Image (cartoon, rainbow, N blue to C red):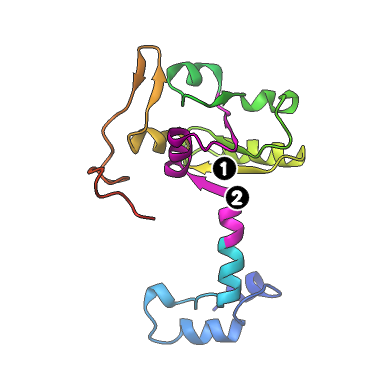
Amino acid sequence: MPGIAPALRGRPGPSLSAMTATVNSQASRAMTIPPASPADAAAHFAARLALYTDVSDVAAALADGTVDFTLVDTRGDAAWQQAHIDGAVHIPSAELAAADLDPSRPVVVHCWGPGCDGAAKAALALALRGFRVKEMVGGIEYWIREGFPVRTPGGVRADRPDPLTAPTDPAVGCAC
C-alpha cells in the first residue's frame, strides 16, 4: 500500500506486514487495521481518561457537591455573558498565563465545543505551568445540548436534551 509504510515505520503496534495482510484480506472495514493489543489499548484509554472528562461527569460533580476540581471557562467575555455554567471560573485563554489558580487542585477546562480547540490550548498552557488538567469533552455546546443548566442574562435556563446527543428520558440515562 503506497504511502502507508513511511507513515508506520518505527511506530508501536501491529507490524506493517500484519496490517497489510489484513488490509488485503476480506476483513470488514471496521477491522481493516487490526485492533491494538490489550496492553496497548489499556494504556491508550487510561491516558485518554486522564486527559478528558465529559459534561455528564462534570454536571454530576456540580450537582452532588463532589467538585474536587476547578472548572475554567476559557471563552471570551462576550461568550461568558451569553451563557456560562454556574460554578465555573471565567479565565479567557489570553489571561491564563496570569491566572491565580490553586496549583494543588486539578483543573477542568472548556471552551465552545468540539469544533473549537481553545480548551486544548488552555489545557496545554496550564499543564506547562504545572497544573494537572483535563479537557471537558464537548465544551459548553454539549453541556447545553445535554440539557444541563446555564446562566444567561435572563437567568438560569436548561434546554431539553438534544435526542441526538443525550437520553431524553431522565429515567433511561446513558449508564456509562
Taking the spot 64% from the left edge, 35% from the top edge, the residue there is 122
Question: Residue under circle 2?
Answer: 51
The answer to whether residue 2 of the structure is visible from this angle is: no
Residue furthest to the top: 154
Quick check: 23 above or below 127? below
Q: Is residue 90 above or below residue 1?
A: above
- Tell me, yes or no, whether the highlighted magenta stretch contains residue 59: yes
Q: Nearer the viewer, residue 162 or 11?
A: 162
Q: Amino acid at mark 2?
A: Leu
Q: Quadrant of the C terminus?
A: bottom left
Give the residues in magenta: 46-75
Q: CA distance from mark 1 to mark 2?
A: 6 Å
User: Where 26 sits versus 142, above or below?
Assistant: below
Q: For residue 56, what is the image quadrant?
A: top left
Residue that numbered label 1 is attached to: 135
Quarter holding residue 151 = top left
* Quadrant showing the N terminus: bottom right
